[in-house]
């Protein structure tokens, strides 16, 4: 009986504590559920945020890809334009080079045509002088006729040259060859006149000693031996070192 009284307070306390423990367990379950719900909401929110971020990144990547494609197209277009401009530059360079070449050819052509008319320096029988191209051609042509042995043709050619170019630097040489052509044609008087004309105009000419010897030869052919001897004496005195002077001495020996 005593034990029952002793245990009664404890049983009463236990009965009071049992509902409180049940309430505590219930409270803990609600808190856990709320925590789980909150965590799930946060996870769902984070997942949604990640999905949005991924979608934004895909959109940015797509925009970047389109931008790069447009940039590549612009680069290709610029390359094509540069190639076209380079081609134009190369064509322009070729056109300029062709124009310069044609200009040079034209200038050379003009210069060549002018050269046909402008006097040029020539050297004949040790003398230098200016002569027109036509003048030079006609003298050379007349000399070529003489060298072929066509003495009548050469006589006429040189006579025409002297008439046409009375002040020419070729004149002394033309008179010399005209005289030789006349001598070959046995026109001794005509030859004598032209040799003397040469000596009167150019006594220091390279052909002068030969011209004096030719005068003596014409005099001999004309039977003027006295005149020939005097001419030969004058030749030896005037041109003692010339080959013509040596020939003159031999002829003087035969004439005496």
Image (tube, rainbow, N blue to C red):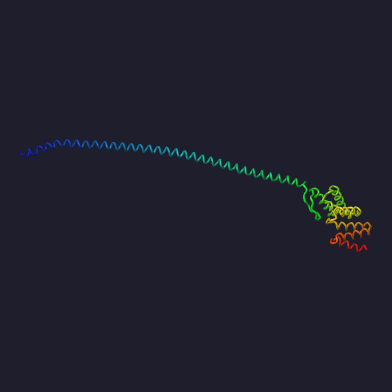
Task: Provide residue 72's location: percent of width, then percent of height.
Answer: 50, 41
Residue 13 found in image quarter: top left
Task: Provide residue 66's location: percent of width, then percent of height.
Answer: 46, 38
Residue 181 found in image quarter: bottom right
The answer to whether residue 204 is left or right of residue 28 is: right
Task: Provide residue 108's location: percent of width, then percent of height.
Answer: 71, 46
Q: How many marks?
A: 0
Between 240 and 174, the one lying in front of the other is: 240
Between 54 and 105, the one lying in front of the other is: 105
Instruction: Specify the quadrant that holds the N terminus.
Output: top left
Q: Is residue 64 above or below residue 211?
A: above
Instruction: Specify the quadrant that holds the C terminus.
Output: bottom right
The answer to whether residue 135 is left or right of residue 77 is: right
Extreme-front residue of the structure: 237
The answer to whether residue 213 is left or right of residue 75 is: right
Task: Provide residue 119's location: percent of width, then percent of height.
Answer: 78, 48
Between 122 and 177, the one lying in front of the other is: 122
The answer to whether residue 43 is left or right of residue 206 is: left
Extreme-left residue of the structure: 1
């Amino acid at each position: 009986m005593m034990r029952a009284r002793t245990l009664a307070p404890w049983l009463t306390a236990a009965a009071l504590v049992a509902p409180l423990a049940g309430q505590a367990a219930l409270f803990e379950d609600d808190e856990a559920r709320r925590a789980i719900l909150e965590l799930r909401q946060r996870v769902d929110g984070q997942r949604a945020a990640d999905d949005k971020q991924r979608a934004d990144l895909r959109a940015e990547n797509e925009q970047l890809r389109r931008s790069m494609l447009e940039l590549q197209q612009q680069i290709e277009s610029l390359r094509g334009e540069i190639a076209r401009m380079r081609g134009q530059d190369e064509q322009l360079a070729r056109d300029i080079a062709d124009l310069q070449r044609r200009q040079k050819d034209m200038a050379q052509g003009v210069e060549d045509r002018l050269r046909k008319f402008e006097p040029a320096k020539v050297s004949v029988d040790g003398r230098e002088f200016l002569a027109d191209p036509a003048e030079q051609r006609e003298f050379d042509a007349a000399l070529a006729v003489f060298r072929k042995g066509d003495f009548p043709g050469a006589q006429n050619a040189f006579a025409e040259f002297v008439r046409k170019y009375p002040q020419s630097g070729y004149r002394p040489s033309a008179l010399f060859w005209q005289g030789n052509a006349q001598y070959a044609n046995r026109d001794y008087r005509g030859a004598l006149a032209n040799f003397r004309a040469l000596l009167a105009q150019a006594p220091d000419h390279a052909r002068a000693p030969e011209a004096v010897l030719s005068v003596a030869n014409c005099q001999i052919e004309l039977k003027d031996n006295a005149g020939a001897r005097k001419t030969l004496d004058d030749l030896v005195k005037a041109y003692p070192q010339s080959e013509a002077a040596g020939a003159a001495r031999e002829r003087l020996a035969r004439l005496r």
